[in-house]
């Protein structure tokens, strides 16, 4: 399979009151057509900023450096704002956690969907309206014509998230970036939205980057996963491999924290990894996880490379689990 997205050595820093915050450090990733790469990590590990870097939507204060950021023949580091805007919503689109932050409360659902279509495609208003109805239908919204004349506040959270998905898909993008798209939903609606995204990806052969802090969600939707910690990807593997043989002590810790139905005692407190994520404005040389790691030794103060420990399984640790 050919990679449609290739990122090498992405570094992102932000000026903050306490100094310079190194939010992303040496991140490399590849996404192939038809796969779902899950980026998983605790809050603050740099997942959303990674997504925003790929969308060209970084805050003004961010400084991005990268050896390579290629998407379908475009060098993303060299695109003008206008060229990036032409790609967004057309070839690459994003689904956010909270639909109300991206839906405009003043316009109907139909108008907002049509606007995205008309921004990128020829065919006029009539074609845009047909396409809007078609895509609402495809994301499982009954009576699309009725929904199209409604405003966002008239829909439930689950329906609004489906509208967001419809908006992301209306121009048939090659890559969807979904940033915690189901975190604000109840568990049953979450399951419906996950299976919808998965079936749409399969049907259209779209590639997806799915961002979540929840390994349970990763197990449901990923074909491959990248585990982020303190701005770095510390482990990447095909999904079965990651759950079967997690190599980084952090990944192992995350997996051990998932309650197992029938096995975990209900009265037992939920497991957590002790300690805290390091301050990203401080010196971050060596392994960022070492202060929380039972295996850590003096060598963990030195720089560690990502190495391939099994086929397509990369880990950034001197003492990987075996
Ligand atoms: P995640 O999505 O994994 O929770 P983020 O990518 O949002 O993490 O953030 C990574 C780090 O960058 C965090 O420490 C966060 O506080 C910081 N950060 C994110 N956005 C900004 C911003 N606009 N200005 C300053 N710091 C930010
Ligand atoms: Mg986030």
Image (cartoon, helix red, strand yellow):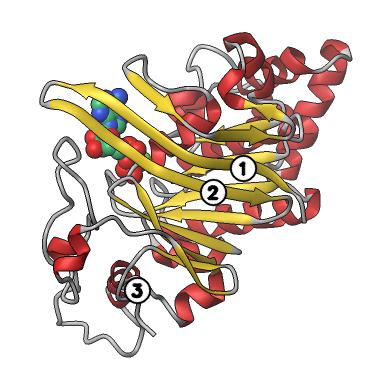
The residue carrying mark 1 has its beta carbon less than 8 Å from ligand 1:
no
Sequence-first tag of 2 and 3: 2
How far apart, in angstroms, are the residues tagged by discs 1 and 3? 28 Å
**Marks 2 and 1 close (CB-CB < 8 Å):** yes
Q: Secondary structure at mark 1?
A: strand
Image quarter (top left, top right, bottom left or bottom right) of the C terminus? bottom left
Decide if residue 252 is on the left or right side of residue 198. Answer: left
Locate residue 297, reporting x and y percent: 15, 71
On the image, numbered disc 1 is attached to which residue?
A: 6
Q: Residues within 10 Å of mark 1 (few under 14, many from 20)?
A: some
Sequence-first tag of 2 and 1: 1
Locate residue 202, reporting x and y percent: 75, 56
On the image, numbered disc 2 is attached to which residue?
A: 29
Q: Please tell me which residue lies in front, 254 or 300.
A: 300
On the image, numbered disc 3 is attached to which residue?
A: 255
Task: Report the image quarter containing ligand 1.
Answer: top left
**Marks 1 and 3 close (CB-CB < 8 Å):** no
């Amino acid at each position: 399979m050919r990679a449609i997205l290739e990122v090498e050595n992405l570094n992102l820093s932000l000026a903050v009151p306490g100094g310079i915050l190194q939010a992303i450090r040496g991140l490399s990733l590849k996404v192939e057509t038809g796969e779902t790469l899950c980026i998983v990590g605790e809050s603050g590990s740099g997942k959303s900023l990674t997504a925003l870097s790929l969308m060209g939507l970084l805050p003004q204060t961010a400084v991005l450096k990268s050896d390579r950021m290629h998407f379908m023949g475009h060098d993303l580091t060299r695109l003008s704002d206008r060229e990036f805007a032409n790609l967004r919503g057309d070839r690459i689109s994003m689904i956010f956690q909270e639909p109300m932050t991206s839906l405009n409360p003043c316009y109907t659902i139909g108008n907002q969907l049509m606007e995205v279509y008309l921004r990128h495609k020829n065919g006029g208003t009539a074609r845009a309206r047909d396409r809007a109805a078609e895509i609402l239908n495809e994301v499982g919204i009954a009576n699309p014509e009725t929904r199209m004349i409604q405003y966002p506040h008239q829909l439930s959270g689950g329906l609004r998230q489906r509208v967001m998905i419809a908006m992301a898909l209306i121009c048939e993008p090659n890559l969807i970036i979904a940033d915690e798209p189901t975190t604000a939903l109840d568990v049953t609606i979450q399951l419906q939205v996950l299976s919808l995204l998965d079936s749409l990806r399969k049907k259209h052969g779209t590639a997806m980057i799915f961002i979540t802090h929840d390994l349970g969600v990763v197990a449901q939707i990923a074909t491959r996963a990248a585990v982020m910690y303190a701005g770095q990807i510390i482990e990447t593997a095909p999904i079965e491999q990651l759950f079967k043989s997690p190599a980084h002590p952090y990944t192992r810790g995350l997996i051990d924290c998932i309650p197992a139905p029938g096995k975990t005692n209900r009265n037992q407190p939920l497991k957590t990894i002790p300690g805290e994520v390091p301050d990203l404005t401080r010196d971050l040389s060596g392994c960022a996880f070492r202060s929380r790691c039972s295996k850590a030794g003096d060598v963990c103060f030195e720089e560690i490379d990502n190495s391939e420990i099994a086929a397509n399984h990369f880990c950034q640790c001197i003492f990987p689990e075996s």
